[in-house]
Image (tube, rainbow, N blue to C red):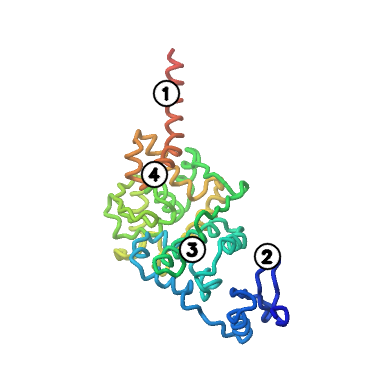
């Protein structure tokens, strides 16, 4: 009976699809059942109905939950594009019909953006836990999903800023790139947090910040170079800035986006011949400077807001090795 339907097509995996306007829409019901016939005709009529227990319903529940509001802004920002993707692809479908193979297929379709692809099972797992609590399904189809690995040719290490590179930047960089540079090194924060600083957060000596990723509230004493650039930037404004105005602001006073900051810095790095040192390596440099000053891991973490010590040990370890080597060399020279 199934084969008589003109617009049906069966994938080699055994799945059935309906071809409409050059696009293929999957039929989730079992072939030969009334539900299968209903889905077929609803697709052809363009009136595919939304299942009562749909992924859209779960996504709505998640967004209204205390769990969602408890996530950090950074984590919600990471999840939101995946939720929109799921709404588009499977939003109207019955929650109970998704299989692990469907999740792997979605990940494979997005393997060109590995981080996004790996957030698909994470997001589905969050939704599946809600479905289990509501007895919409008994399992979590995203459990034990194997994540994609980032191809080796795309794993580019952050090259730390050298003393020579820092000196060249401070001597020759334009005012805005120099301000961005000092915010990155002086605050020791992630680039995604830089645009969040407002003039209210600067009291003349310190910057205050709530980290996007961790939600930590930090007070950050400014380095002399950062204080100098902040004071110079504030003095250059035609009128005293409103406390809510971003320190890194567009001409209309709105927050400068991460992408604009990255573009400005890349253009200046190219002009000064410092392309090997990227935006994220400024935090790397800040951690190293704290280590050069003799700070221990706890002191560095109180400044950088790192939740684990692994990255601190990596970044600070290089500075400590350099200092020990210089000390050993001096002792060797004297001997």
Q: Which residue is mark 1?
A: 327
Q: Which residue is mark 2?
A: 13
Mark 3 or 4 closer to N-term?
3
Callout 2 secondary element: loop
For marks 3 and 2, give the CA distance: 22 Å
Residue, x 33% and y 39% (percent of image)?
A: 298
Q: Can you tell which quarter of the image residue 210 is in?
A: bottom left
Q: Residues within 10 Å of mark 4 (few under 14, many from 20)?
A: few
Q: Nearer the viewer, mark 3 or mark 4?
A: 3
Mark 1 or 4 closer to N-term?
4
Q: Residues within 10 Å of mark 2 (few under 14, many from 20)?
A: few
Q: Which residue is mark 4?
A: 308
For marks 3 and 4, give the CA distance: 26 Å
* Farthest-out residue, top: 335
Mark 1 or 3 closer to N-term?
3
Mark 3 or 2 closer to N-term?
2
Mark 2 or 4 closer to N-term?
2
For marks 1 and 3, give the CA distance: 53 Å
For marks 1 and 4, give the CA distance: 29 Å
Query: Does residue 214 lie above or below 293 as drawn?
Result: below
For marks 2 and 1, give the CA distance: 65 Å
Callout 3 secondary element: helix
| Horizontal side, residue 297 vs residue 105: left or right | left
Q: Which residue is mark 3?
A: 124
Q: Nearer the viewer, mark 2 or mark 1?
A: 2
């Amino acid at each position: 009976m199934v084969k008589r339907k003109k617009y049906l097509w069966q994938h080699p995996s055994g799945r059935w699809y309906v071809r409409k306007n050059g696009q293929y829409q999957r039929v989730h019901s079992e072939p030969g059942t009334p539900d299968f016939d209903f889905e077929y005709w609803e697709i052809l009529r363009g009136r595919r109905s939304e299942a009562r227990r749909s992924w859209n319903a779960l996504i709505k529940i998640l967004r209204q939950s205390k769990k969602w509001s408890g996530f950090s802004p950074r984590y919600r920002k990471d999840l939101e594009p995946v939720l929109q993707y799921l709404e588009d692809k499977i939003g109207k479908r019955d929650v109970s019909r998704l299989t692990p193979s469907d999740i792997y297929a979605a990940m494979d379709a997005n393997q060109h953006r590995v981080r996004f692809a790996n957030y698909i099972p994470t997001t589905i797992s969050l939704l599946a836990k809600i479905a289990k609590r509501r007895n919409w399904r008994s399992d979590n189809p995203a459990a034990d999903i194997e994540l994609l690995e980032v191809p080796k040719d795309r794993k580019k290490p952050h090259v730390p800023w050298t003393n020579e590179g820092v000196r060249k930047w401070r001597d020759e960089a334009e005012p805005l790139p120099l301000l961005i540079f000092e915010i990155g090194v002086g605050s020791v924060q992630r680039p995604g947090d830089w645009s969040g600083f407002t003039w209210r957060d600067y009291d003349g000596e310190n910057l205050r910040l709530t980290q996007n990723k961790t939600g930590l509230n930090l007070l950050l004493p400014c380095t002399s170079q950062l204080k100098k650039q902040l004071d110079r930037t504030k003095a250059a404004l035609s009128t005293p800035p409103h406390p809510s105005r971003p320190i890194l602001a567009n001409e209309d006073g709105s927050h400068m986006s991460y992408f604009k900051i990255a573009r400005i810095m890349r253009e200046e790095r190219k002009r000064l011949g410092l392309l090997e040192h990227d935006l994220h390596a400024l935090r790397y440099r800040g951690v190293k400077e704290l280590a050069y000053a003799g700070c221990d891991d706890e002191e560095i973490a109180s400044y950088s807001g790192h939740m684990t010590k692994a990255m601190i040990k990596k970044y600070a370890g290089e500075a400590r090795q350099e200092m020990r080597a210089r000390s050993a060399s001096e002792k060797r020279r004297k001997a």
